[in-house]
Amino acid sequence: MDKKKEKLDNILTELKSFVVAFSGGVDSSFLLYRAHALKNINMIGVTIRTPYIPDVEINESVEFAKTHGINHRIIELSFPESIRDNPVDRCYKCKKTLFTELLSFASENGYRYIIDGTNADDMSVYRPGLKALDELNVRSPLREAGLTKKEIREMLREEGLSVWDKPAMACMLTRIPYNTMVDEGMLKMIEQAESYLREKGYPGVRVRIHGDLARIECLPGDLVKMVQNPDRELIIKNLKKIGFRYLSLDLEGYRSGSSDPEI
């Protein structure tokens, strides 16, 4: 792991001038933190706010950068109409749109490269957005250094950073079936429901929306807790108040990409 960290530092030092695409997640947090710790580097973290990114992710990215004294900027972006119907190649089109915006920002502000938090594990799962990164010549130093998610979490833990065990968040479009027209009302329902369930003690929860039905995915250890929770009736009441008519608990629990096509 030390050799991989050294390789990462060498890559960042050679790049010298770059924008870090900072989502506030585990990988980009580590990348941003590591780049900031190196000397003689001209860098900035940039977070793009869109209607389908939960506000909690934006707020946590701002807080992380502020806590560590890292140069950071928020860019506001409206909903790209090319993904309004949530197409199967949504991630490709979204990445193309977001990173084209970052390239413009970098060009206008004198930064040479764009880097992102793609890690080595991402190469073995369904990640259509990676094609867009390759087309736009975005560098992925964590992937290039061979760092896995587990190793990144461990290095964050060693640094004493609380984000080391932060659950994955992902954009809210992943909660909506492909080829479904998306409106802001759907996104608001998903965000409110997940925020409420996290407050009730269910980290990493996903609320997948299917019309007026909510399919809830919990972390494996929380399935029994959800069923036996003495506040279950209150949870049901509040989720219905948000706008869901039917509530279901997915017995497979949370798994990344549960709505992705089989490949």
Image (cartoon, helix red, strand yellow):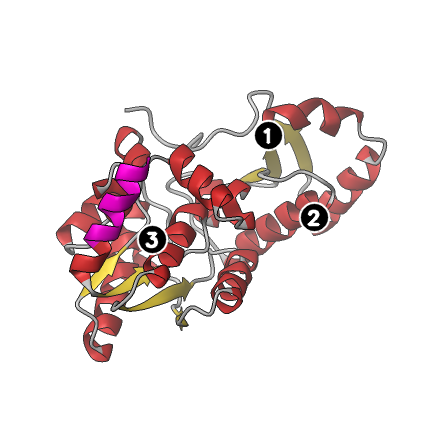
Furthest toward the right, the residue is 230
- First in sequence, mark 1 or 2: give its number: 2
Check disc 2 and report the residue beneath it: 196
**Residue drawn at (59%, 52%) of the image:** 191
Q: The residue under label 2 is which amino acid type?
A: Tyr
Q: Is 6 in the magenta?
A: yes
Residue 124, quarter of picture: top left
Tag on residue 83?
Answer: 3
Between the C-alphas of marks 3 and 2, the distance is 27 Å
Q: The residue under label 1 is which amino acid type?
A: Leu
What is the secondary structure assignment of the residue under circle 1? loop
Q: Are marks 1 and 3 in contact (CB under 8 Å)?
A: no
- First in sequence, mark 1 or 3: give its number: 3
Check disc 1 and report the residue beneath it: 219
Quadrant position of the C terminus in the picture: top left
Q: Are marks 1 and 2 in contact (CB under 8 Å)?
A: no
What is the secondary structure assignment of the residue under circle 2? helix
| 167 vs 224, nearest the viewer | 167
Percent position of residue 48, x then y:
39, 64
Q: Nearer the viewer, mark 1 or mark 3?
A: 1
**Residue drawn at (66%, 44%) of the image:** 198
Mark 2 burial class by Cα count in 10 Å: few <14, some 14-19, many 20+: some
Residue 180, quarter of picture: top left
Q: Is residue 193 left or right of residue 257?
A: right
Residue stretch in magenta: 1-11
Q: The residue under label 3 is which amino acid type?
A: Ile
| 147 vs 114, nearest the viewer | 147
